[in-house]
Image (tube, rainbow, N blue to C red):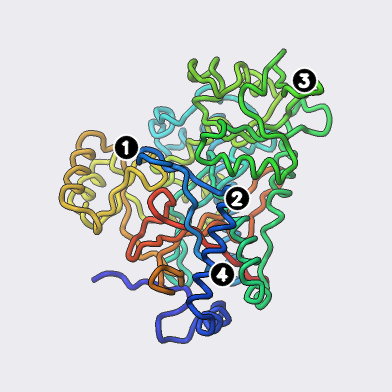
């Protein structure tokens, strides 16, 4: 029997949950043609300001407008208080873990995380061994993907400690919802998110390198206009009031990073870089990279520049490492985890692999380094051919996969072509870590626009909606 699906507004025909009562009354009164008009206005807004994402490998124009659902998701203040406390705890533990694996490696020596899962991992960067970073922070901007399955049941689905994207959508979603439905917004006491970019700039400035001599100069580094998240890079630089740079705009002299400007060279202290590790420095990583800055790793190791997020932070994105995070919380913080992991089978382990192979039709199987909804099997929705293909992949390289049960993700009211209907959602809150740790009240709610679909990624047809956290 399929598990019951928790609807966050309330089951059809039942009394709506307290946070959704005003929204339910509003939806009952507003005509569908007005909702349709508002949705068209939202699409026009997004096209005008150029909010796009890229889907590669499908032919045609890869640039698309991300689907935006005009009906907000609402979280009670008490719900958010619990989530927020759990996020701070989790990110503190992840930062401690990354610092440890590039330092004393105590968690490996204790046998809590197997050494081979770290030292042989393709995301592990030996160049970071022994590098000391300000405030011991390695993931300055984290995005923690969460799902809900019941009134008080939230699970962490995965951790994004390398380059989490989507915060620009969170901010633009809020702006457009306030524009389209000011009457509804005013009937709620919603915690603001528009201070995020100020908080981000404050966080980045607070982790200036040890040799910074004055007010730190912060820049955002992008791979360029053809990157799928370029809009976000430009948006964040503009909102923070800092320069958006590409690799050729920077150079290193005497282990110091400089930016080329019309007034001459300007020293750079903190780089919010959206360039992957492999392409960051052709002298340290890929020699054929034209996106990076030769010598930047030496400047980094010398304490003359700081990079956010840190080189090598991707070790904590690994879906096999994810399974050890609850133990990290206990090991580093001496606390019980507030947020739960989804039960996970590591296919690198013999018994787990045997179970997964026998239950492929029931499980979700993911690549350890996969992202964007690619390289995964949703067993209950898969064909026999797809299941057979994954069974072969597991035989060939079991260490590349993990498996999880198919969760009954919660649903929220969503405006689709048929009208207002429940659709599955997840949530990516954003956590900033510097001298202090801050959590933005809300985050990016992603919604599976297709009926019955559990895949919320925009690259797989998913959309987004505004997330309203109510003030206490």
Q: Which mark is residue 400?
A: 1
The structure residue drawn at horizontal position 41% and vertical position 45%, both measured from the top left corner, is 372
Earlier in the chain: of badge 4 and badge 2, it is 4
Label 2 belongs to which residue? 168
Distance (Cα) linking label 3 and label 1:
45 Å
Q: Position of residue 431 (x, y in %)?
A: 61, 50
Label 4 Cα neighbours within 10 Å, binned few <14 / some 14-19 / many ≥20:
some
Distance (Cα) linking label 4 and label 2:
20 Å
Apparent side of residue 115 relative to residue 295 in the rendered image (left or right): left
Q: Residue 265 carries which label?
A: 3
Instruction: Tell me the quarter of the picture where residue 245 sits.
Output: top right
Kind of element beneath mark 4: strand
Q: Which of marks 3 and 1 is in front?
A: 3
The quadrant of the picture occupied by the N terminus is bottom left
Residue 78 visible somewhere in the drawing: yes
Q: Residue 75 carries which label?
A: 4
């Amino acid at each position: 029997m399929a598990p019951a699906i928790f609807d966050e507004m309330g089951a059809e025909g039942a009394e709506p949950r307290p946070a959704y009562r005003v929204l339910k009354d509003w939806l009952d009164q507003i005509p569908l043609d007005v909702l349709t008009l508002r949705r068209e206005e939202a699409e026009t807004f997004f096209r005008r300001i150029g909010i796009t994402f890229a889907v590669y490998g499908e032919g045609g124009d890869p640039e698309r407008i991300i689907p935006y659902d005009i009906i907000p998701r609402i979280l009670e203040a008490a719900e958010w208080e619990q989530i927020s406390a759990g996020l701070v705890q989790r990110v503190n533990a992840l930062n401690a873990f990354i610092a440890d694996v590039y330092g004393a490696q105590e968690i490996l020596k204790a046998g809590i995380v197997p050494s081979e899962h770290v030292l042989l991992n393709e995301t592990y960067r030996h160049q970071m061994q022994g590098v000391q970073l300000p405030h011991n922070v390695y993931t300055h901007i984290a995005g923690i993907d969460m799902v809900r399955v019941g009134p008080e049941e939230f699970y962490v689905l995965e951790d994004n400690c390398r380059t989490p994207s989507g915060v620009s959508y969170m901010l633009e979603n809020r702006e457009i919802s306030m524009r389209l439905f000011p009457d509804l917004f005013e009937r709620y006491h919603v915690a603001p998110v528009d201070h995020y970019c100020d908080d981000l700039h404050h966080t980045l400035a607070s982790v200036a390198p040890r040799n910074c001599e004055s007010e730190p100069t912060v820049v955002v580094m992008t791979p360029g206009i053809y990157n799928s998240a370029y809009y976000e890079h430009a948006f964040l630089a503009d909102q923070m009031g800092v320069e958006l740079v590409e690799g050729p705009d920077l150079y290193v002299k005497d282990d110091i990073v400089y930016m080329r400007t019309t007034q001459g060279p300007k020293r750079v202290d903190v780089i919010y870089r959206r360039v992957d590790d492999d392409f960051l420095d052709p002298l340290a990583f890929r020699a054929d990279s034209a996106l990076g800055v030769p010598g930047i790793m030496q400047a980094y190791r010398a304490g003359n520049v700081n990079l956010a997020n840190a080189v090598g932070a991707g070790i904590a994105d690994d879906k096999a490492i994810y399974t050890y995070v609850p133990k990290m919380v206990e090991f580093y913080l001496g606390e019980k985890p507030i947020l739960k992991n989804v039960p996970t089978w590591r296919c690198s382990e013999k018994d787990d692999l045997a179970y997964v192979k026998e239950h492929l039709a029931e499980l979700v199987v993911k690549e350890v380094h996969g992202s964007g909804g690619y390289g995964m099997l949703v067993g209950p929705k898969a064909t026999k051919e797809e299941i057979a293909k994954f069974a072969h992949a597991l035989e060939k390289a079991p260490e590349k996969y993990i498996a999880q049960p198919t969760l009954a993700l919660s649903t929220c009211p969503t405006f689709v072509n048929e009208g207002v209907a429940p659709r599955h959602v997840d949530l990516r809150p954003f956590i900033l870590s510097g001298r202090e740790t801050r959590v933005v009240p809300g985050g990016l709610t992603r919604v599976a626009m297709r009926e019955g679909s559990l895949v919320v990624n925009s690259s797989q047809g998913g959309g987004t909606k505004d997330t309203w956290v109510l003030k206490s």
